[in-house]
Image (tube, rainbow, N blue to C red):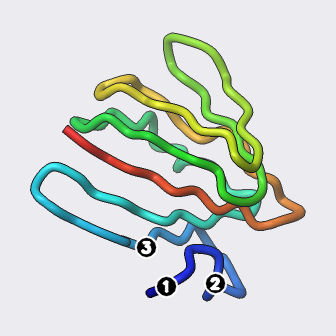
Amino acid sequence: MDNLLSSLPQTLDGEAFESILEASHVRIERIVSRGHTSPDYGWYDQDEHEWVLVLEGAGTVLFEQGPEIHLKKGDHLTIPAHSRHRVSWTDPETVTVWLAVFYR
């Protein structure tokens, strides 16, 4: 057994990605941010759908062809495959913990 809110990194030079589970059609990650955004090289364009839940903190997801959505603790969002998006903001004052489920 483990706890998604324990063992958080003490220092974050960049976002911390941790694989929780991987199977043939699903992948679950814990992502930890503190003032981090998506890399400047462009947009995420994933082959899988993504369901994301904010467990702690807050962040903003920007879609290339759509809205900018602010998420706070307890909020979740489904991102369809090939919906180009990026994280445009995470709270710089506190750790943001995301649970991301990627599925086909």
Crowdedness near tag 2: few (<14), some (14–19) or many (≥20) residues, C-alpha within 10 Å: few
Residue 3: percent from the left, percent from the top?
56, 80
What is the distance, in whole Å, between disc 3 and disc 2 at their CAs? Answer: 13 Å
Q: Looking at the image, is mark 1 or mark 3 earlier in the sequence? A: 1
Residue found at the very far right of the displayed protein: 93
Mark 1, secondary structure of its residue: loop
- Closest to the observer, 17 or 98: 98
Please report the residue visible at 64 percent of the width from the left and 50 percent of the height from the top.
54
Q: Quadrant of the C terminus?
A: top left
Which residue bears the numbered disc 3? 18
Residue 73: percent from the left, percent from the top?
75, 50
Which residue bears the numbered disc 1? 2
Residue found at the very far top of the displayed protein: 65
- Closest to the observer, 51 or 34: 51
Please report the residue visible at 49 percent of the width from the left and 85 percent of the height from the top.
2
Residue type, label 2: Ser
The mark lying in front, picked from 3 and 2, is 2
The mark lying in front, picked from 2 and 1, is 1
Q: In this view, does 83 lie to the left or right of 35?
A: left
What is the distance, in whole Å, between disc 2 and disc 1 at their CAs? Answer: 8 Å
10 in relation to 64, above or below: below
Mark 3, secondary structure of its residue: strand
Q: Residue 99 carries which label?
A: none
Circles 3 and 2: CB atoms closer than 8 Å:
no
Quarter residue 92 falls in: bottom right
Which residue bears the numbered disc 2? 6
Q: In this view, does 86 lie to the left or right of 102?
A: right
